[in-house]
Image (cartoon, coloured by chain):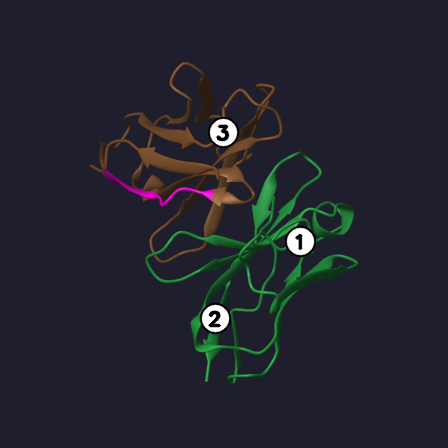
Chain colours: A brown, B green
Amino acid sequence: QVQLQESGPGLVKSSQTLSLTCTVSGASVNSGGHYWTWIRQHPGKGLEWIGYMYSSGTTYYNPSLKSRIAISVDTSRNLFSLRLTSVTAADTAVYYCASWPIHWGQGTLVIVSS
Amino acid sequence: QSALTQPASVSGSPGQSITISCAGTSSDVGGYDYVSWYQQHPGKAPKVMIYDISYRPSGVSNRFSGSKSGNTASLTISGLQAEDEADYYCASFTSINTWVFGGGTKVTVL
């Protein structure tokens, strides 16, 4: 059973870079067939797909966020990461990582403050 | 990419069946057999109920079923129970190798 756990700062200052990690257990981030994915949910709103990295290393990003995001994998620690640059209050959300489409983490709230 | 279209709310009485629609285009729902459905209770992470149009992950009740016709996918909940009251989201693969969610549907058990 694949399990995922998000971690990172709960508070980020406006204009700075948000960095989150997702630790994976029950699977190797190196193994084929996994789509290591980030999703977010603004407070009281619906889900927004951010992007994913396929096991081969290929990445695909939401066009609306593409210029500000990067997803990477750390095979030595069996985790994958999200970097979101130049954050604003509009990036305040609960961020989820997933082995898309089935296994999700519990989510972590990130608040962007001015 | 535009969000898929779901009804804002659907309701039903215990024991009834309800269907939630998810309307897209030929560039997403209609073009691929990759639609997933998620259930989300307040304060909880989403849980996959259906993937690849109609496949149920292990542990998901067979009261949940998925289908697709043209550019619209559907989730049917049969034998509605109080525990089914939640928000439901569809998601589809798109022609630019991304995924897009629907706006979500609030299911109320009367």
Q: Taken as a whole, is the magenta stretch helix, strand or loop? A: strand
* Residue at the extreme top: A76
Q: Residue at x 30, y 33 (%)?
A: A7
Q: What residue type is labelled 1?
A: Tyr
**Residue B84: assigned label:** 2
Label 1 – label 3 distance at C-alpha:
22 Å
Label 1 – label 2 distance at C-alpha:
18 Å
> Which segment is the magenta one?
A104-112
Q: Residue at x 49, y 59 (%)?
A: B39
**Residue B55: assigned label:** 1
**Residue B96: assigned label:** none
- Of residues A36 and B94, the one drawn nearer to the viewer in this rendering: A36
User: Mark 3 or 2, which is nearer the eye?
Assistant: 3
Q: What residue type is labelled 3?
A: Ala
**Left or right for A19, reference B79:** left
Examine the image and state in which quarter residue B96 appears. top right
- Of residues A59 and A76, the one drawn nearer to the viewer in this rendering: A76
Count residues near mark 1 (Cα–Cα under 10 Å), then give few for <14, some for 14-19, many for 20+.
some
Count residues near mark 3 (Cα–Cα under 10 Å), then give few for <14, some for 14-19, many for 20+.
some
Labels 1 and 2 in the same subunit:
yes
Q: Mark 3 points at which residue?
A: A27
* Residue at the extreme right: B70
Q: Mark 2 lies on which chain?
A: B
**Left or right for B9, reference B95:** left
Helix, strand or loop at mark 2: helix
Helix, strand or loop at mark 1: loop
Examine the image and state in which quarter residue A16 appears. top left
CB under 8 Å between discs 1 and 2: no
